Amino acid sequence: MAVGPDPQQGDGRFFVAWLHIVAPKGAVPTATSTCACGRDRSAVGHRKVLALVEDHTAHRDACPLRNSSAGRNAA
């Protein structure tokens, strides 16, 4: 029996940041923003969760794991 390639082997991409939002109907929403660079923030309530979503999105441009100087120089 021949052994084929490992089907679990990825394409080199990996998750760096996670945004987890819980908003049950009729309850107070909560959110957590986590990044592999060490950033870990949370929010409770509609306005604070919306602000955290914006902050999480803005972090993409500032994260040192996504925007290393080596990556900018190679482009």
Image (cartoon, rainbow, N blue to C red):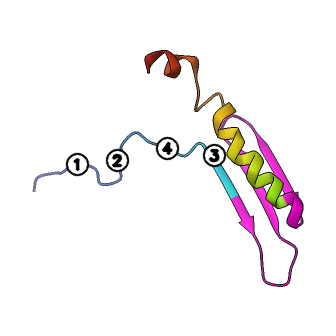
**Residue on which the image places disc 2:** 9
Front residue (pair 2, 35): 35
* Secondary structure category for the residue under label 2: loop
Question: Does the residue at mark 1 contact the one at mark 4 (Cβ under 8 Å)?
Answer: no
Residue 18: x %, y % from top left: 65, 51
Q: What is the spatial separation of the Cα atoms under label 2 and label 4, in whole angstroms?
A: 12 Å
> Foreground mark, 1 or 4?
4
Front residue (pair 33, 36): 33
Residue at image point 59% right, 28% down: 67
Please state which amino acid type lies under the numbered disc 3. Answer: Ala
**Residue on which the image places disc 3:** 17
> Foreground mark, 3 or 2?
3
Q: What is the spatial separation of the Cα atoms under label 4 and label 3, in whole angstroms?
A: 10 Å
| Crowd around label 2: few <14 · some 14–19 · many ≥20 (10 Å) | few
| Crowd around label 3: few <14 · some 14–19 · many ≥20 (10 Å) | many
Front residue (pair 18, 71): 71
Residue at image point 78% right, 79% down: 24
**Residue on which the image places disc 1:** 5
**Residue on which the image places disc 4:** 14
Please state which amino acid type lies under the numbered disc 2. Answer: Gln
The segment highlighted magenta reads 20-48
